[in-house]
Image: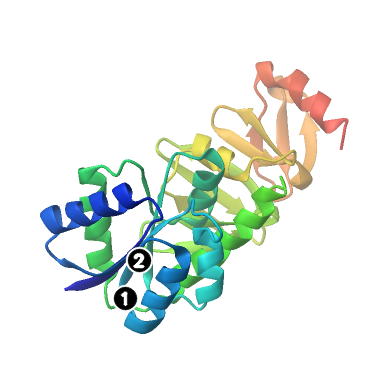
């Protein structure tokens, strides 16, 4: 049985989630339902849950501040939030799961299945991702580009400094990320999503299938319609429609 604590300052949302878990997720035992972050900290400290369903937007102390006080975490966290582009980008950078309000039954059941998969395992990997999440929140609150992301592979999470990325190439629903030192990683995300996660003035979409780090360009050649050579000697096409934007951006560096 998975021991769970719910933390949400909105009583209707808290009661609804409690009802959904009782009705649809019989492997989950709710040991506490808390209406504030302060109550949640006490319940978690005293009961050592397996999972915490945590609302982000709470008065006085939000979910992120609450986690800062609980480090090291040592339990699975499923974040619950109303749609917020800023928060969701932080979750995606950190490869952490979240549920949108109002919580959908199917999404909840899928989240519980993931919990069952990792129940009883070492939580260090998730603690690392939560630490990354909290860092991303600080960067995004200051309107700063993200410095590190968690790349989701088929069997693990790889934490990468964005500055280490040379370029990314689309492979249909996957993206191959090329890093300094000759390593490359295939991630289970489209190039469009990767671009959203690491968007900053240092990255540029040269072609529908390529995203490059402008700080890792070796040269641009006009032969064969024009292409870019990266520091790892990879040859990246520059589409005709992107040339003007490319040179305009590059002149500002």
The spot of residue 83 in percent (x, y) is: 45, 39
Residue at x 14% of width, y 58% of height: 22
Q: Is residue 28 visible?
A: yes
Which residue occupies the foreground of this view, 202 or 127?
127
Determine which residue is flagged by label 2.
Answer: 52
Q: In the rendered image of this protein, does residue 157 appear above or below residue 208?
A: below
The spot of residue 186 in percent (x, y) is: 46, 51
Determine which residue is flagged by label 1.
Answer: 49
Measure how far apart labels 2 and 1 are at the Cα level.
7 Å
Among the 4 quarters of the image, the one containing residue 250: top right
Q: Is residue 161 visible?
A: no
- Quarter of the image containing the C terminus? top right
Among the 4 quarters of the image, the one containing residue 40: bottom left
230 to the left or right of 64:
right
The spot of residue 236 in percent (x, y) is: 65, 35
Q: Looking at the image, do the residues carrying marks 2 and 1 touch, with CB atoms under 8 Å apart?
A: yes
The spot of residue 16 in percent (x, y) is: 24, 49
14 to the left or right of 91:
left
């Amino acid at each position: 049985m998975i021991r769970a604590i719910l933390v949400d300052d909105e009583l209707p949302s808290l009661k609804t989630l409690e009802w959904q878990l009782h009705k649809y997720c019989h492997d989950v035992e709710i040991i506490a339902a808390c209406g504030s972050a302060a109550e949640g900290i006490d319940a978690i400290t005293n009961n050592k849950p397996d999972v915490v369903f945590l609302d982000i937007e709470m008065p006085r102390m939000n979910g992120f501040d609450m986690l800062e006080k609980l480090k090291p975490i040592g339990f699975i966290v499923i974040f619950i939030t109303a749609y917020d582009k800023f928060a969701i980008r932080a979750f995606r950078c950190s490869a952490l799961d979240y549920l949108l309000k109002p919580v959908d039954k199917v999404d909840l059941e899928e989240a519980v299945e993931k919990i069952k998969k990792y129940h009883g395992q070492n939580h260090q990997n998730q603690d690392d991702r939560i630490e990354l999440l909290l860092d991303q929140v600080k960067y995004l609150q200051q309107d700063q580009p993200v410095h590190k992301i968690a790349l989701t592979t088929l069997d693990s999470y790889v934490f990468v400094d964005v500055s280490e990325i040379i370029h990314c190439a689309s492979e249909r629903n996957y993206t191959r990320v090329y890093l300094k030192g000759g390593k490359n990683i295939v991630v289970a995300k489209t190039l469009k999503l990767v671009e959203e996660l690491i968007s900053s003035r240092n990255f540029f979409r040269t072609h529908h299938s390529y995203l490059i780090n402008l700080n890792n360009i070796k040269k641009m050649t006009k032969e064969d319609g024009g292409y870019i050579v990266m520091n790892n000697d990879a040859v990246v096409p520059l589409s005709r429609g992107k040339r003007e934007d490319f040179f305009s951006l590059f002149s500002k560096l």
